[in-house]
């Protein structure tokens, strides 16, 4: 059994190739998947989470990701998401690979959203706003650039110095990158708005959105978290990656569902898009809204693609 470290994982998981690997997973489907989240409540009111994410394609592979989400790690100079992935052979049940869980999660997460961008964003989308300047942010820019002609990027963060530092790091010939001083103006400017935060209160207001935009919500993975408000939900066509990870667990969708503002029938998932059962963007005037919930099926697809690259 071979272990794939973080450096090798990042080198082998090219963004465009992984987008297509995920698309194939959604077309093919997964036979079994599950999700267990354990919580540790901390005295300051925050919490640490430990997630167990198994998935199984019969006869091909099964795998499980063990991942810790410790938001306080940022103050210690550590990634907030750490873990390990184990891939098993579907014919024998023998372990095949272990993979650095943080690197796999970073690449999987942004490429999953890039797949949604490929279905939902305008073909000519060039201006990207990234809300948040953590570990996911630079990968968002590269993944979305693999599926759309991104030429201008703005970074907004509650700590402006972090946005400015990331903008300097990402700038390169052919890509203009700057730090946004004011969130509303940056949202109105962008063709694609991607959020990568742990916010409990909505950051994106629906009244700021304009026709033709794509809203891409990656962070805020718990029922008590929100990155966009109800007005954004009501103004947009709604897309998610998977019903079994989003409808009950992600506040940006679960809260409007519980309040009766939207119905399950209003929502299209990536399985339906990949199989051609429902359309993605239907016009240049639509506002599209994608909420990512993650899931073991995405991790399995990522590990399978990694195995194919060895």
Image: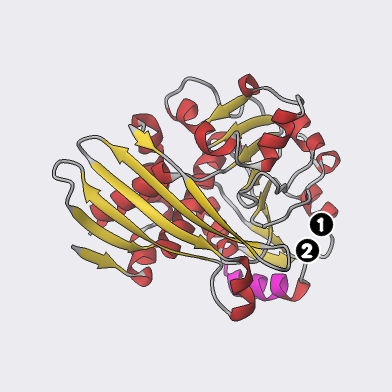
x and y, in percent, of residue 104 in the image: 41, 59
The secondary structure that most of the magenta stretch takes on is helix
Kind of element beneath mark 1: helix
User: Do the CB atoms of the residues marked 1 and 2 lie less than 8 Å apart?
Assistant: yes
Label 2 packing within 10 angstroms: few (<14), some (14-19), many (20+): many
Kindly indicate the quadrant of the structure image that contains residue 7.
bottom left
Instruction: State how many labels appear.
Output: 2
Residue under label 2, please give it: 180
Residue 225 horizontal side relative to residue 144, left or right: right
Residue at x 73%, y 68% (from the top left corner): 44
Label 1 packing within 10 angstroms: few (<14), some (14-19), many (20+): some
Residue 306 horizontal side relative to residue 93, left or right: right
Q: Quadrant of the N terminus?
A: bottom left
| Residue nearest the viewer, comparing 12 with 175 | 12
Residue at x 20%, y 42% (from the top left corner): 90
Residue 122 horizontal side relative to residue 161, left or right: left
Magenta segment boundaries in residue numbering = 162-173
**Does the stretch in magenta take in 56?**
no
Placement of 82 over or under 168, stated as above or below? above
Kind of element beneath mark 2: loop
Q: How far apart are marks 1 and 2 (CA)?
A: 7 Å
Kindly indicate the quadrant of the structure image that contains residue 246.
top right
| Residue nearest the viewer, comparing 12 with 291 | 291
């Amino acid at each position: 059994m071979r272990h794939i470290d973080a450096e090798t994982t990042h080198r082998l998981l090219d963004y465009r190739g992984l987008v297509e690997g995920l698309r194939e997973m959604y077309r093919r489907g997964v036979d079994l998947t599950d999700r267990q989240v354990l919580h540790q409540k901390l005295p300051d009111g925050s919490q640490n989470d430990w997630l167990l994410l198994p998935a199984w394609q019969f006869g091909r592979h099964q795998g499980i990701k063990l991942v810790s989400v410790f938001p306080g790690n940022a103050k210690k100079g550590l990634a907030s998401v750490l873990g390990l992935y184990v891939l098993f052979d579907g014919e024998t049940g023998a372990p095949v690979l272990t993979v650095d869980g943080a690197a796999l999660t970073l690449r999987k997460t942004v490429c999953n959203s890039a797949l949604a961008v490929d279905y939902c964003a305008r073909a000519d989308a060039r201006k990207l706003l990234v809300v948040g300047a953590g570990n996911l942010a630079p990968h968002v820019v590269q993944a979305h650039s693999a599926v759309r002609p991104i030429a201008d990027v703005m970074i907004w963060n509650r700590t402006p110095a972090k946005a400015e530092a990331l903008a300097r790091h990402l700038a390169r010939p052919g890509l203009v990158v700057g730090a946004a001083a004011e969130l509303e103006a940056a949202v109105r400017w962008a063709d694609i708005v991607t959020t990568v935060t742990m916010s409990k209160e909505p950051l994106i207001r629906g009244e700021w959105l304009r026709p033709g935009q794509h809203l891409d919500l990656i962070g805020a993975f718990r029922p008590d978290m929100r990155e966009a408000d109800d007005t954004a939900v009501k103004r947009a066509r709604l897309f998610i990656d998977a019903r079994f990870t989003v409808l009950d667990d992600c506040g940006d969708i679960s809260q409007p569902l519980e309040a009766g503002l939207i119905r399950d029938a209003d929502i299209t998932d990536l399985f339906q898009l990949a199989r051609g059962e429902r359309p993605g963007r239907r016009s240049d005037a639509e506002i599209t809204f994608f909420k990512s919930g993650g899931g073991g099926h995405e991790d399995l697809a990522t590990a399978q693609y990694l195995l194919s690259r060895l």
